[in-house]
Amino acid sequence: MRVLTDLEPKNVFSFFEDICSIPHPSYKEEKISNYLVEFAKARGLEHYQDELHNVIIIKEASEGYEDVEPIILQGHMDMVCEKAPDCDKDMDEEGLDLLIDGDFISAKGTTLGGDDGIAVAYALAILDDDSLSHPRLEFVCTVCEEVGMEGATGIDVSMLKGKKLLNMDSEEEGVMLASCAGGCRADVKLPVERETVSGTKLTVSLSGLTGGHSGSEIDKGRGNANILMSRLLRDASAPVAIASIDGGRKDNAIPRECTAQIIVAPDEAAAVKASIEQAAAEIAEEFKASDPDLKLTVSEETDCSESAISAKDSARVIALIEALPNGIIRMSREIDKLVETSLNLGVLKSDDAAVTLRYAVRSSVGVAKKSLKNQLVCIAGAVAAEVTFEGDYPAWEYKKDSKLREDMVRIFEEMYGKKPTVEAIHAGVECGLLSGKIEGLDCISMGPDMYDIHTTEERLSISSAKRSYEYILRVIACK
């Protein structure tokens, strides 16, 4: 049964509900991509779908707008898939269970994917409505934005004619983005030796942290479950052998949970457990404002004998996590309260041969990003770990003279009776990559109010989504 039927604008929320019913995690966008192609075919619209499953849909200008400069509408079709510990939904195969609570839409037990499903819904609603006034519209919908903007990196945009791009991948109504950080993904892989270890196995779990987006919320001081787990193991009262350690699912989300299984000598188990609980209590006090629901659980299993990382290499694992930087590296010297450079240990995982640390690296200054990457290589090399980088994307530099920005500010003032905020953001949007593909591209990023994106508390404001859509319609009707 559909949930959003009575919401306005009906066409926007109808398409949004369609999108939410189709699984669309990063790297598995084929179904949603095909949905977009079928949408275009049904309306006789020019469209392109590449091997990556990026989609471009073009609608020619309405009457009287034939000579107006085209506008590129842009968003991404993939979503960050996170779910609550007690949620058994298979987000690779199942759609979302939508909920309405007052002015907000959310999803039961999972992320909502308003980032960036609402942009896709906006674009489809616009392309579907033949009553609107608009120039040639070119909708660019990419894959794998959430894992390093791989779709935008690989897309061919040679068929586009527009030089003005409206990116709809922001989460605060009235805030227009005119610049963003560049970044990449870094994998630090530490080879380890395993051996059969006998003793008492302790399963140590941290959960209930607030989490959040590793770019826009890296400055909130929230706990990182992977980093905090290393602190617990570091402060254990005796050497530990790590059987497994796993935390986080996405490099661009601040991890909320981490679990480690460790084996200790039987006569030291009680003391190790007590020292971990003491360290967790100190952490809970330290992060009580940002992570009030932080929870530690420790279960115990005696007389175990199983494969584990040797105590020596376990110490190297802990030392590596502790030595590598995490969080804010430097604040901007030019823009007040803007993070310039940061990184986030989003994923920590172990297998038979290695422990891998996956980071999201961000900076609005190219040389600072280069320096941070070199720092990771230097520290990792000291313990014989290897570092690889993927998905490198450039910063989107501020454009001093922007006709699009001027028009959007003026229209916003007319509609809202106040000036919007124009700012830079310490998160990646695809404007930087697309600007590198289209010479002279003029970009602005905007969107409705969304909260706690990339977490299971993600929610979209219904009233803000409606106002933002009405605003977009006025922008595309501008001559």
Image (cartoon, rainbow, N blue to C red):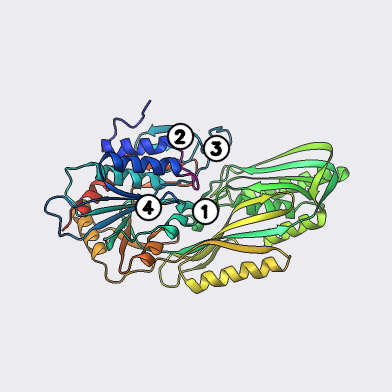
The residue that mark 3 highlights is 84
| Residue 70 lies in the magenta-colored region | no
Counting other residues with Cα less than 10 Å from the Cα at mark 3, is it few (<14), some (14-19), or many (20 or more)?
Answer: some
Q: Which residues are magenta?
A: 23-28
Assign the N terminus to one quadrant of the image. Answer: top left
- The amino acid on which the numbered mark 1 sits, given as a three-letter code, is Asn
**In the depicted structure, whether residue 298 falls above or below residue 186:** above
The mark nearer the N terminus, 1 or 4, is 4
Real-space CA distance between mark 1 and mark 4, rounded to the nearest whole angstrom:
15 Å
- Please report contact status of discs 2 and 1: CB closer than 8 Å, yes or no: no
Outermost residue toward the bottom in this view? 367
Counting other residues with Cα less than 10 Å from the Cα at mark 2, is it few (<14), some (14-19), or many (20 or more)?
Answer: some
- Majority SS type along the magenta span: loop
Q: Which is more foreground, mark 2 or mark 4?
A: 2
Residue positioned 62% across, 70% down in the render:
375
- Residue 339 location in percent, x, y? 47, 64
The residue that mark 4 highlights is 169
Residue positioned 36% across, 51% down in the render:
75
**In the depicted structure, whether residue 438 falls above or below residue 215:** below
Q: Which residue occupies the foreground of this view, 157 or 439?
A: 157
The mark nearer the N terminus, 2 or 1, is 2
Can residue 104 be seen here?
A: no
The residue that mark 1 highlights is 252
Taking 469 as reference, is 246 left or right?
Answer: right
- Please report contact status of discs 2 and 4: CB closer than 8 Å, yes or no: no
- Residue 469 location in percent, x, y? 26, 46
- Residue 138 location in percent, x, y? 28, 54
Real-space CA distance between mark 3 and mark 1, rounded to the nearest whole angstrom:
17 Å
Q: Secondary structure at mark 2?
A: loop
The residue that mark 2 highlights is 95
